[in-house]
Image (spheres, helix red, strand yellow):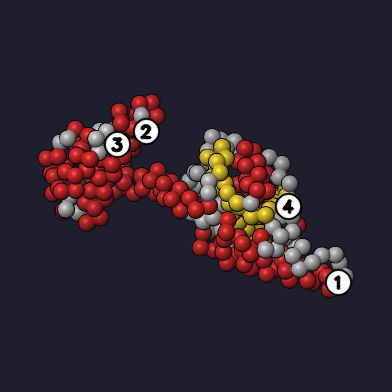
Amino acid sequence: MSLSIIGAGRVGRALGKLLHRRGWRIGAVVTRSTKNARAAVKFIGAGKPHGKLTPTIFSADMILLTTPDSAIAATSAKLANMARGFAVSASRRNQSGSPASALRGKIVLHTSGAIDSLALAPLARCGASIGSMHPFQTFSARGIPDLRGVTFTVEGDPLAVRMARRIARQLGGIPIQIPASAKPAYHAAGGFAAAHVLALIEGGTQLLVALGFPRKGAQRGLLRMARQIFLNLETLGPQATWSGPVSRGDFSTVAKHMAALKQFAPEFSAAHAAMLLLSARVLSADRGAPLRRLKRMLK
């Protein structure tokens, strides 16, 4: 199979490199500048760099859009217009093809977690099979994450979903199909384990630094606690792992926490209150009483 990649940032580079290792032929690699495209090709180990959309994209069996979410719909529309123009030009040169033939039979997937495949509707009208494939994993600017055992959520046309499932399995992942309408909530759930955890650890670190802790020591201590929580969660389950004053019914300590946090930026106390309420909602066996008491305290 051959693959064109549009928007080869962290996700595009990583998926391109992993698929290249598994025998995929990498064709056009498109970014916002030729310099970035060349860097992406060097990282992937294959492909032809392009600083803008090009008809050579259509020579691949599959097109992978890994652009930022805000650019998916616009890129889809531009690609559809290019496909129509490319086909019309071919027909004028007495070559075979119709105004939709450049994309007919192609599979186009995007990798957004929050947006469904309808963002690719212009390409579907040109004959492509469209879908989305989102690895439930964070990607950094350095290295490639291990995708073995990682969930890949997929949705879209039947042919596109089959291809997305195939790719997920090739990369050692576990494909799970979800309704298109579920994607925003699904993506928000991922934030609880990624962006929110990062913000909470960094927020706790900054609190400790403000109280006189060295930054490295503060971060090291909080990370150690977090790792133990994750280990306990895996082995014991959520309720048995739950700790802290609300889990013990110690609401006087909660009141002291909230009073102490008033000396810091308001986001700290707001986040602490929100996490206390969420803990009571999702972890308490008798969530009604703790929730009611917390809500009265936190007004």
Horizontal arrangement in the rendering, residue 164 relative to residue 197 (left or right): right
Q: How busy is the neighbourhood of tag 3: few (under 14 within 10 Å), some, or many (20 plus)?
A: some
Q: In the rendering, which numbered label is found on residue 230?
A: 2
Q: Is residue 185 above or below residue 244?
A: below
Q: To which residue does mark 1 refer? A: 93
Could you tell me how far apart the alpha carbons at marks 3 and 2 are, in whole angstroms? Answer: 15 Å
Could you tell me how far apart the alpha carbons at marks 4 and 2 are, in whole angstroms? Answer: 41 Å
Q: Position of residue 87 (x, y in %)?
A: 77, 67
Could you tell me how far apart the alpha carbons at marks 1 and 2 are, in whole angstroms? Answer: 63 Å
Mark positioned earlier in the residue sequence (3 or 1)? 1
Q: To which residue does mark 4 refer? A: 61
Q: Nearer the viewer, mark 3 or mark 2?
A: 3
Q: 289 or 255, which is in the foreground?
A: 289
Q: Nearer the viewer, mark 3 or mark 1?
A: 3
Mark positioned earlier in the residue sequence (4 or 2)? 4
- Label 3 sits on a secondary structure element that is helix
